[in-house]
Image (tube, grey):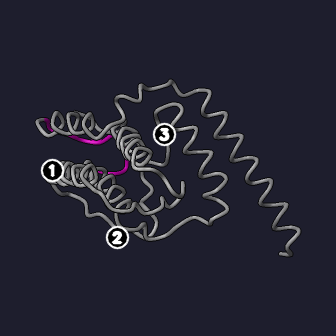
Amino acid sequence: MNRRQFIKGSIVTSGIAISGIVGLNLFINKVSKDKLTTEYALTVIDRLSRQELSSSGVWEPYQIFMHCAQSVEYSMTKFPVHKSRVFKETIGKLAFSAFEHKGQMTHSLSEPITGAPNIAKHKSAQVALTYLRNTLVAFDQYQGQLAPHFAYGALTKREFEMAHIMHLNNHLDEIIS
């Protein structure tokens, strides 16, 4: 593929992705940002920890909660694999902006974080909820420099907090209590 074809393909692909994100944004009901806090998420986790849980999706509850915890941990350390700089500065920023505006995100609920270790099946949801809770508390208390998000790029602590809670909320769509 020559450079010209690559640039044309990139522009077309970006245009389609941007159109999809903007279109999707029109169909998502806005969620109050005061519920996009670690404190609020901890109350949800505490409520879930007192219930029997199952999943309507591909992943079991243990996998879902550990996946969400991985994302929180990586924001304090480093995501294993990143999208290109161009992606993060265009599509990634646009996607995060749309999600932030609506207060919720949608993404593939069975896609692992690229480069992250596989998460085992058939383990206790309660153990994973405790781990997620501890990870969110550690994030809340974290004072160091945050790692860039693998798709959105550099985020402030508040933006990361909202991203983590929107991510968790999206996965909670598959949790049955």
Q: Which corner quadrant holds the C terminus?
A: top left
For label 1, the residue is: 130
Residue 83 screen position, x and y as percent: 57, 64
Give the mark nearer the N terminus: 2 vs 3.
3
Report the residue that reaches farthest toward the front: 143
Q: Residue at x 59, y 52 (%)?
A: 92
Report the residue that reaches farthest toward the right: 4
Q: Is residue 128 above or below residue 166?
A: below
For label 3, the residue is: 105
Q: Secondary structure at mark 1?
A: helix
Give the mark nearer the N terminus: 3 vs 1.
3
**Are the residues flagged by discs 2 and 1 in contact, CB closer than 8 Å?**
no
The kind of residue tagged 2 is Pro
Residue 105 screen position, x and y as percent: 48, 39
For label 2, the residue is: 117
The kind of residue tagged 1 is Thr
- The residue mark sitting in front, 2 or 1, is 1
Residue 33 screen position, x and y as percent: 41, 30
Report the residue that reaches farthest toward the bottom: 2
**Magenta-drawn segment:** 51-60
The kind of residue tagged 3 is Met
Q: Along the line of sight, which residue is nearer the eye, 92 or 2?
A: 92
**Are the residues flagged by discs 2 and 3 in contact, CB closer than 8 Å?**
no
Indicate yes or no whether the magenta region holds residue 54: yes
Q: Residue at x 64, y 56 (%)?
A: 89
Indicate yes or no whether the magenta region holds residue 63: no
Give the Cα distance between marks 2 and 1. Answer: 19 Å
Give the Cα distance between marks 2 and 3. Answer: 23 Å
